[in-house]
Image: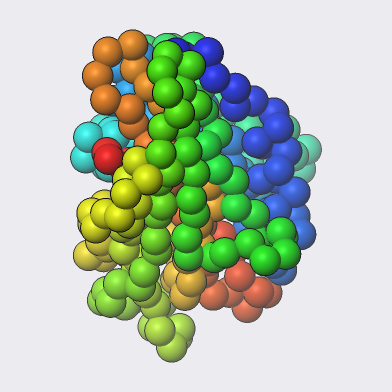
């Protein structure tokens, strides 16, 4: 597989549509940025209107070996001035993140959209996703399946009025077409930027194949949090190393 893989506006448009129609509340839209050439860094931007009126944009840079944010990231931005709009928030946020984007040459390596799982699709499973990869340099590869589960975590003080706050686990249950049991992620605590999550769903999967080395998979998980107006949604990128 080469680096000539498409991501682009199609994925952004789908995720934007999902954010607008799936639930009441503030469900963030998400746009993948890309990978470093060696696959060790992945970045994405999420954006939306907080409380339906405050434009925000956040750009995350993920260490795909550890799953942690790179030091000094993410880049957070909210605009409260009178002429604020979402376009302005996104541009300013990407400008702030541009040095890191250029440092890792992320726009050169978009990766492959291996699967997309919008909650607006009737019959779309919430907790699983199954996909394969494009093999331009050999025989077709087998399927991969990811499974979400709940994880019991301590309730953050900011969520004391929410009855039950949960974390998530992620397992790779199929690898190259064969049954598999690999725990990819298990929450031990809830980060502040998730809010008070009460539900998680699989949103998609990306794959990137470096010129040398093993492929990197990214599971896109949507965390849905309780709010007075419905549910708020924030994206989590989980590296998977089959």
Residue 197, horizontal then vertical, whole percent:
45, 70
Judge from the rendering whether residue 207 lies leftward or rightward of residue 226; answer left or right: left
Q: Residue at x 72, y 60 (%)?
A: 120
Q: Residue at x 40, y 84 (%)?
A: 164
Q: Is residue 62 above or below residue 178?
A: above
Q: Quadrant of residue 175?
A: top left
Residue 11, horizontal then vertical, whole percent:
65, 36
Quadrant occupied by the N terminus = top left
The residue nearer to you, when weighing 78 against 224, is 224
Quadrant occupied by the C terminus = top left
Q: Quadrant of residue 208?
A: top left
Q: Residue at x 63, y 62 (%)?
A: 124
Number of numbered discs overlaid on the protein picture:
0
The residue nearer to you, when weighing 81 against 146, is 146
Tell me if residue 59 can be seen.
no
Tell me if residue 122 can be seen.
yes
Judge from the rendering whether residue 72 lies leftward or rightward of residue 205; answer left or right: left
Residue 196, horizontal then vertical, whole percent:
44, 71
Q: Residue at x 50, y 26 (%)?
A: 134
Judge from the rendering whether residue 42 lies leftward or rightward of residue 230; answer left or right: left
Residue 199, horizontal then vertical, whole percent:
48, 71
């Amino acid at each position: 597989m080469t680096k000539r893989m498409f991501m682009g506006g199609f994925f952004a448009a789908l995720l934007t549509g999902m954010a607008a129609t799936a639930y009441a509340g503030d469900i963030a839209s998400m746009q993948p940025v890309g990978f470093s050439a060696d696959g060790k860094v992945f970045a994405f931007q999420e954006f939306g209107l907080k409380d339906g009126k405050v434009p925000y944009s956040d750009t995350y840079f993920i260490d795909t070996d550890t799953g942690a944010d790179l030091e000094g990231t993410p880049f957070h931005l909210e605009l409260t001035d009178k002429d604020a709009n979402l376009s302005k928030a996104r541009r300013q946020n990407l400008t702030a993140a541009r040095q890191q984007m250029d440092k890792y040459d992320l726009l050169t390596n978009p990766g492959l959209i291996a699967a997309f799982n919008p909650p607006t699709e009737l019959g779309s499973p919430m907790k699983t996703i199954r996909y394969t990869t494009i093999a331009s340099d050999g025989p077709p590869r087998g399927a991969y399946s990811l499974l979400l589960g709940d994880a019991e975590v301590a309730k953050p003080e900011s969520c004391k009025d929410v009855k039950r706050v949960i974390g998530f686990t992620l397992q790779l249950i199929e690898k190259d077409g064969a049954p598999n049991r690999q725990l990819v992620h298990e929450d031990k605590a809830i980060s502040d930027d998730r809010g008070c999550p009460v539900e998680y769903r699989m949103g998609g999967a990306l794959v990137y194949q470096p010129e040398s080395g093993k492929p990197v998979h990214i599971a896109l998980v949507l965390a849905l949090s309780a709010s007075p107006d419905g549910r708020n949604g924030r994206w989590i990128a989980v590296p998977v190393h089959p």
